[in-house]
Amino acid sequence: MTQRVVVFDAYPFDVGGAHRLIRRLADALPAKRWTLRAVLPAEGPAADYLRHGGVDVDILAAPASLLHYGGSTKGARALNATTALPRYWSHWQRHLRANADVGAINDIRGMLLALG
């Protein structure tokens, strides 16, 4: 029986080491009877990079307020992000239950977005 792993990556707007790792995992896991899907909060270079490497990608669209990073999340933007999180958490949990036997998250930002 094939097991399914879903990897959540919170950074769709750039390609980095985590994305290269996801591609390597997607190549290696079938030999161990696992499949891998990547989930990102928006379309962008990371999704393109992963798809080009043969990785199945799902976009679990995050509200715009959750797509700002670091110091750009202040004041009203921070309040909007805080109020948007519970709904996004619920959306992610439904997606995970329907599509994975195991979920993995690459970083602290991903934990914030996905672990409500």
Image (spheres, rainbow, N blue to C red):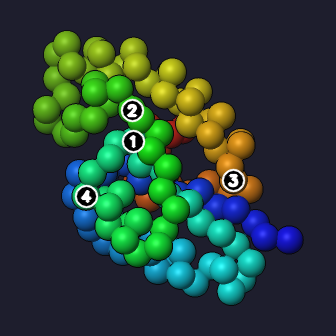
* In this view, 27 is above or below 62: below
Tell me what residue is drawn at x 25 percent, y 21 percent: 78
SS class, disc 1: loop
Can you identify the residue that label 4 sits on?
A: 45
- The residue that disc 1 covers is 41
The residue at the far left in this view is: 72
Q: Position of residue 63 (x, y in %)?
A: 35, 26
Kind of residue at disc 1:
Pro
In primary-sequence order, the first of circles 4 and 3 is 4
The residue carrying mark 3 is 100
- Secondary-structure class at tag 2: loop
Q: Residues within 10 Å of mark 3 (few under 14, many from 20)?
A: some
Query: In the image, which disc is placed on residue 71?
Result: none
Question: Is label 3 in contact with label 1 (beta carbons under 8 Å)?
Answer: no
Ranked by sequence position, the earlier of labels 4 and 2 is 4
Q: CA distance from mark 3 to mark 1?
A: 17 Å
* 16 relative to 75 in the view: left or right: right
Q: Nearer the viewer, residue 115 or 68?
A: 68
* Residue located at (39% from left, 66% from top): 50
Type of residue at label 2?
Answer: Ala
